[in-house]
Image (tube, rainbow, N blue to C red):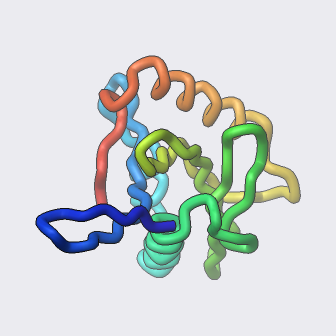
Amino acid sequence: MYTLFVQKGEIVLTNFECLYYKTINGRIPVMDFIDHLSFKTQRKFYVKIDLLEEYGPRLPEPHAKKIEQDLYELRFEADDGAFRIIYFFYIGKKIILLNGFKKKTRKIPRREVELAKNRMVDYLNTLDSCVIKEK
């Protein structure tokens, strides 16, 4: 999804921006998770991130799926398994990436959803102080 606005007489298209949740200790959980994946799997992750930034909440299955109230999962697969990143949308076309995991069962583990919820609450309480843009 794009937003149109005029800048110096020109129409400019903007899309969504993925931001990485950062803990109070300075860790970036999604980046820590991605860094431990194979190079090939990391490339698949970044392709999905590009799609998410372009389409936002309109990104369809099998790429993304709503998992509960405000939480979504970004889905990608590679030779070494199925992977998920849990995220939510925030004001100003921001997408906050909360946590990542390798999917081993049919259902998303409850602990992963609870962890994402806790991080979302932390973000909402501290706002922009706990996110970082990295690529």
Q: How many marks?
A: 0
- Front residue (pair 9, 13): 9
Res. 41 in view? no
Give residue 9's position: percent from left, percent from top: 16, 70
Res. 82 in view? yes
Give residue 81's position: percent from left, percent from top: 68, 71
> Which quarter of the rendered picture does the C terminus lie within?
bottom left
- Front residue (pair 43, 37): 43
Residue 32 against residue 34 in the figure, above or below: above
The residue most toward the top is 125
Residue 45 against residue 126 in the figure, above or below: below
The residue most toward the front is 9
Q: Residue at x 46, y 18 (%)?
A: 125
Asked if residue 80 lies left or right of residue 69, the reply is left
Give residue 67's position: percent from left, percent from top: 77, 48
- Front residue (pair 4, 86): 4
Instruction: Choose top left, top right, bottom left or bottom right for residue 82.
Output: bottom right
- Front residue (pair 53, 119): 53
Residue 59 against residue 130 in the figure, above or below: below
Q: Residue at x 34, y 31 (%)?
A: 128
Give residue 79's position: percent from left, percent from top: 64, 81
Asked if residue 91 lies left or right of residue 79, the reply is left
Q: Residue at x 55, y 62 (%)?
A: 56
Q: Residue at x 62, y 52 (%)?
A: 101
Instruction: Choose top left, top right, bottom left or bottom right for residue 55.
Output: bottom right
Asked if residue 90 lies left or right of residue 17, the reply is right
